[in-house]
Amino acid sequence: MSANRKEEIIASQKPFQDFYPDHLAHCYGCGRLNDHGHHLKSYWDGDETVAWFTPQPYHIAIPGYVYGGLLASLIDCHGTGSAAAYAYRAAKREMDDDGPPLRFLTASLHVDYLKPTPLGVELELRGRAAEIKGRKVVIDIELSAGDAICAKGRVVAVQAPDKYIVDLVINKPEA
């Protein structure tokens, strides 16, 4: 993707994750309220979703290459954010409407590592909905470094019922 296209996308849209209510914005991968997280931001690019992330030197696996767990984390967070965005689209809702928030959690994450992913290169994640059925959304994601697809992932995301979120986050059961 050209730098101009990326700038156009970022300038014209609010990232999906920035629509999450505060009590749902603490995820290590994409939560805007997590001071130590990755702060991944996902956007629409036509009928696909897109996000970018530049790994830091401490994301190392072996010299010059990214730790695979980071790639899984990025695919996971882009997948759940994309699931929410596709669900809103399918329901003909805007992400900032007054209805209940559609928040998705990972039910399954599968990652195929296709080639070593270099450090020091901006990574691009592209998501496509493979299935939208009831509370389940399946997202296929390609993670690229430059022109090379380094990993492919599939995220099966399920919409968390409001009661579940309230019980988990607000009422916090005893450990």
Image (cartoon, rainbow, N blue to C red):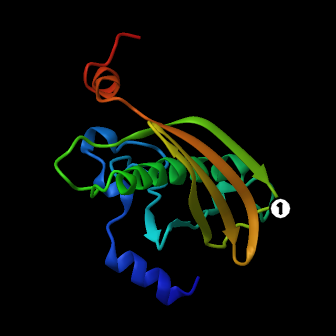
Furthest toward the top, the residue is 174
- Report which residue position mark 1 lands on: 115
Q: Residue 82's spot in the image, x, y percent?
A: 48, 54
Picture residue at 70% right of the left edge, 77% below the top: 146
Q: Residue 145's spot in the image, x, y percent?
A: 70, 71
Q: What SS does tag 1 mark?
A: loop
Picture residue at 63% right of the left edge, 54% below the top: 140
Q: Residue 148's spot in the image, x, y percent?
A: 76, 73
Q: Residues within 10 Å of mark 1 (few under 14, many from 20)?
A: few
Picture residue at 16% right of the left edge, 48% below the top: 98
For the residue marked with disc 1, what is the amino acid?
Answer: Lys
Foreground pick, 119 / 155: 155
Above or below for 165 versus 58: above
112 left or right of 35 in image: right
Q: Is residue 37 visible?
A: no
33 left or right of 128 in image: left
The quarter of the picture where the C terminus appears is top left
Q: Is residue 61 visible?
A: yes
Picture residue at 20% right of the left edge, 45% below the top: 99
